[in-house]
Image (tube, rainbow, N blue to C red):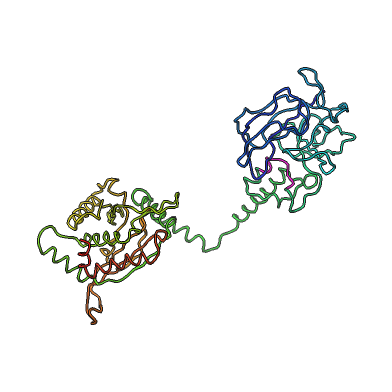
Amino acid sequence: MAQVLEFKLPDLGEGLTEAEIVRWLVNVGDVVAIDQPVVEVETAKAMVEVPCPYGGVVTARFGEEGTELPVGAPLLTVAVGGTAPADGASAVSAAPGKPAASAADAESSEYSGNVLVGYGTAGPAARRRRVRHAGPGVTAGGRTEAKAPAAPQAQAPAAPQAQAPAAVVQTPVAPVAPEGPVPVISPLVRKLARDKGIDLREVRGSGPEGLILRADVESVLAAAETAAETAAARPAPAAAPAPVAVAAAGERVPLRGIRGAVADKLSRSRTEIPDATCWVDADATELMAARAAMNAAGGAKISLLALLARICTHALARHPELNSTVDTAAREIVRLPSVHLGFAAQTERGLVVPVVRDAGTRSAESLTAEFARLTEAARQGTLTPGDLTGGTFTLNNYGVFGVDGSTPIINHPEAAMLGVGRIIPKPWVHNGELAVRQVVQLSLTFDHRVCDGGTAGGFLRYVADCVEHPAVLLRTL
């Protein structure tokens, strides 16, 4: 009487958990020899021919070509130890020229235990121990009732896997050295340990020759959970509840809308951009005098921010590295052809950064008008998405808050931001004498990926020179 055995997709090693059937090498009804390749599968690592450890007649296949199967899923079934049901042909016997004896003898002689091509079975070193999970001939204690009288294998207790159907799997009988392979044969046990973060090399197996069973892994998990519950049940230090109570009683403000978008952008900037900051004090007395003279001449009033914007655009023309962005996917610095200048505007709804398009081509009057339009729209909450995107460089005048200096956070994905503090009278050495001058602190935060300190320092020094001597700009007009 033939015995039908199920062959499952074996553990292919290197942490692989599934494989795709590329090509079946046998059909239902074919007679296969021990260790004959029966299917070609593709894993994330390579193409592999999988041999069947049984000799007999193929009775069923599971999965069509192109199907992806997990490790441990049935591949095919083989009838061993009897005649083929279709045509009465004899199944492959234990050895050429020797008839098959009992079903147990046939199964023992027609099962190699191999899972991949290239594992030898001829020599004594390849002796295998057969472990039966469940099925015909298995007692409640997990041992087979029949024994192969002359087979060089010994019966072993079953690995407790409730969902596994009748199947035969193998494990070496020799003790496993600490540096050798992990003594576990079940792909499900390997997957359970991997999902729970358990190192199987640290688990002591309760099976024969130290075989690691599912119950062993579950015992480790139970011990870890017990330890965690014990730690959680310990009384907390007396000082611990105080911060929790304060946090629970405090006001919670949701991070959403503009505030949430600003938080996300600033966090991304700090996470992705390796920024650095340099700063310098500058005598802005002559710049303030030049602005006063422009406004006294009649016409539209010129804002201080517009003059600083003109200085920035001329400095960026001399140092284009700072008017750029970094393409992290391509690992390239993209230098941008136009300057779209963003400026920080504080509103009741939060901080926004409107963008002045083509700021490098605008006059001081045009810049003043555009700053006024965008600032009013920001206060009214009528800025469009186009008004808030596409900036290449940002100017931040935090001096309006009455502070002297700051370390600006770059407006991602730009490469730099210039910060301007308040302009106030301070003692200053002018023409070799101590005098009271209008002094401002300028700070530049830049992406260190796009340039080094020399470029950043050159940009900031040029801005400071233009602030101290506005006539410098006449060279580029």
Q: Which residue is drawn at 33% across and 50% down?
A: 258
Q: Residue at x 38, y 55 (%)?
A: 266
The answer to whether 243 appears left or right of 139 in the picture is left
205 lies above or below 143: below
Q: How many labels does the image show?
A: 0
Q: Residue at x 78, y 47 (%)?
A: 210
Q: Between 165 and 218, which is closer to the camera in this rendering? A: 165
Q: Between 147 and 69, which is closer to the camera in this rendering? A: 69
Residue reaching furthest to the bottom? 433
Which quadrant of the structure image shows residue 152? top right
Give how far across and how far down residue 373 sits, in percent.
20, 51
The answer to whether 53 appears left or right of 197 in the picture is right
Give how far across and how far down residue 450 sits, in percent.
40, 59
The answer to whether 18 appears left or right of 105 in the picture is left
76 lies above or below 211: above
Answer whether residue 20 is magenta in the image.
no
Give how far across and how far down residue 149 sits, in percent.
90, 34
Residue reaching furthest to the top? 87
Q: Give the range drawn in magenta.
A: 182-190
Q: Between 74 and 467, which is closer to the camera in this rendering? A: 467
